[in-house]
Image: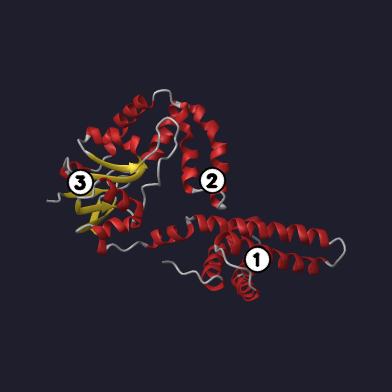
Amino acid sequence: MNMKHNAYDFDKTIYKGDATLDFYFYCIKRHPIILLEIPRNIGCFFLYLFGLCSKKRFKENFFRFLKHIESIDDELAHFWDAHKSKIAAFYLAGRNENDIIISASPEFLLAPICGVLSIRNLIASKVDKVTGICDGENCWGKEKLRRLAEEMPEAEIANFYSDSLSDAPMAEAAENAHMVKKDKIMAWSAYEPSAAERLAKTYYSKEFTLFVFCGGMGTLTNFLCSLAISTRLDPTIAYIFGYSMSLFVAYALNASLIYRQRYEFGRFIKFAISYIPNFLILFAFVFAFLNMLHWNKVVVYALAGMLGLPVTYILVKLYAFGKIEE
């Protein structure tokens, strides 16, 4: 007969925080030489951002900091002595040795605390604790369900707990699923993301970061073209030409880097129209706060940009490229 288990995500579910980041910053304090890896980490981040390296390679690059730790097992023991108090009270009150911890965090990182808590079943990302090399895919989303079926094929999940909607495949496979938000536990089906969480999903993303980069390249194009042409033509005409070129560059980068779509004249026109509200916001701010109230122009332009950028992002995404959130 198949055994029923309760299964738990780890980070921000039964652990108050992100264990990987906590361990990383803990190691930096004890081994400052790890800071030498930061330039490489930043470079790899931009390669990942532009689709030039895989998520797996990005993660392996991050875990290069492990090579600076002489005794990883000793470091893990010290870390969990200092951080075991961050295990959630609700879990400590109801834990069972048959529980399953299933997490994207590295297996080597969670194994010691699972031992302390007498948890026998751990499914997590396989990362070499010496080299940082990943064996297999990140244990996240659908991969969690695949790993569970592979390693515990006879297990049935009575209750599943997580803090993230990315765990929907696990939640659907469980008899009962629960969403954990800080100290509040609710039925998965009853959970509704807050406005702040929806905004974070929209703007705290790889896609939005790339959109900012594309816009920045467009702005640089406008500046360089306007500057070059203004030596031969009227400055106003030069600016109009430069702005037109900036729209084309921004469109081309958005189409190729973010939305992976072919260049189309009709879509470019929609893209240009999407920027009209941004222009109107800038014009309104300049007229009201710069010309009438005489605010500092740097402050005015910054405020206009802060408001105009997210509005333009949504218009470009929905109107120009027709991408609807799943």
Question: Is label 2 in a helix, a strand or a loop?
Answer: helix
Mark sitting earlier along the chain (2/1): 2
- In the displayed structure, does residue 121 sit left or right of residue 34? left
Going 39% across and 59% down the picture, which residue do you hit?
Answer: 197
| Disc 3: CA contacts within 10 A as few (<14), some (14-19) or many (>=20) | few
In this figure, which residue is indicated by the disc labeled 3? 90
Q: Position of residue 211 (x, y in %)?
A: 57, 59
Q: Position of residue 210 (x, y in %)?
A: 56, 56
Mark sitting earlier along the chain (2/3): 2
Tag 2: amino acid: Phe
Q: Position of residue 8 (x, y in %)?
A: 25, 48
Going 31% across and 37% down the picture, which residue do you hit?
Answer: 110
Reply above or below: 10 against 288: above
Question: Is label 1 in a helix, a strand or a loop?
Answer: helix
- In the displayed structure, does residue 148 sit left or right of residue 238? left
In front: 35, or 142?
142
In this figure, which residue is indicated by the disc labeled 2? 45
Question: Is label 3 in a helix, a strand or a loop?
Answer: helix
Picture quadrant of residue 171: bottom left
In this figure, which residue is indicated by the disc labeled 1? 286
